[in-house]
Amino acid sequence: MTDTELVQEGIAPPAAARPGGVIGALAKQIGSRYAVVAVWIAMIAAYSAAEPGTFFTTGTFQAIFDSQQTLVFLAMALLCTITVGEFVDLSVPSVYGFAATVLPVLAVEHGWPVWAASVAAVLGATLVGAINGFLVVKVGVNTIVVTLGMSTFMLGISLWISNMNTISGLPAGFDKIAVTDVGGLQISFYYGLLLAAAFAYVLWCTPLGRHMRFVGANREVSRLSGVRVDRIRFGAFVAAGALAGLGAVVGDAYFGGFNASSTSSLLLPVFASVFLGTAVVEPGRFNPVGTFIGIYFLSTGILGLQLLGLQEWISNVFYGGVLVTAVTISTLLRKRVV
């Protein structure tokens, strides 16, 4: 039947067949997937108009993209556990802080070769992730309890071994692994980009990634389908620890040292980035590409506020507001997906 005949029979034609139906559906899809990107562009335009001689410069955009290398590693670490259904791993920043403290303590205060100190830091962080995984997966302790306790414990250890001081003085040349210029941006930016791309490939193109998502969506059905649920959950915690450790190596190379007391400031932006990412590319789903975009969305917002000369507390308002909004959007989108 033609559309006219359908209308005469009292039946509406399919949306795709109605005039503008395809275009409307396509616009809706693009809007739901890339609204955050549109807001990001609008934010850049607004800041550029407010501070034309300060914000819209090469130096500003280099600062936006060069300053978030540690946050990318931490957000991807958190994404590992969130993907398999462990939504509240509060220990990631403190595990990062532990590794970032161990490296300079061993290299500067105990004379270890910097490469050996780096390996020890990554292995230590990986071990902490494995302990988290064992307690949650094998023992059955609540994720919040384990990771909150481990977060506090590792922060205390970091403050103890550093004597609550900033430890700097890493060997000359170590910074090259983070600050070498490549195409106008520091090489550490590309580490994060490659990490996000690799994670996306694993998640979208491999059986492991599909199993991770199955486990996160429905643990019992996954188990009945033959997926090794406990192994995947445990592996996610181990991977989270390893990524936090690798991020610590890059962060120490970039900043030249670390102060363990700064660890707590990382938790809010990490969670905000991951949840904001659910509104990009795959609405309602945690994904590495969306998380990567979310990180630089937040970086743009914070730097713009600083250039406007607003007081430092506004950063907390911004992060908190974005987190609440992102979680709300994520919840609504996940309901729509289901």
Image: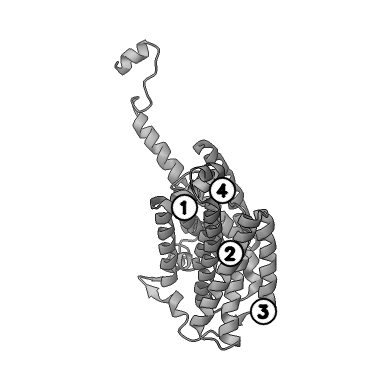
Distance of label 1 from label 4 (alpha carbons): 12 Å
Q: Which one is nearer the viewer's eye here, 217 or 28?
A: 217
Sequence-first tag of 1 and 4: 1
Which marked residue is nearer to the observer: mark 4 or mark 3?
3
Disc 3 residue type?
Ile
Disc 2 residue type?
Gly
- Please state the horizontal and vertical placement of residue 217, each as a whole percent of the image: 53, 44
Question: Which quadrant does the N terminus fall into?
Answer: top left
Q: Are marks 1 and 4 in contact (CB under 8 Å)?
A: no
Tag 1 residue: 290
Q: Are marks 4 and 2 in contact (CB under 8 Å)?
A: no
Tag 2 residue: 129
Tag 4 residue: 326
Sequence-first tag of 3 and 1: 3
Sequence-first tag of 4 and 3: 3
Residue drawn at (53%, 56%), measured in percent from left and top?
Answer: 231
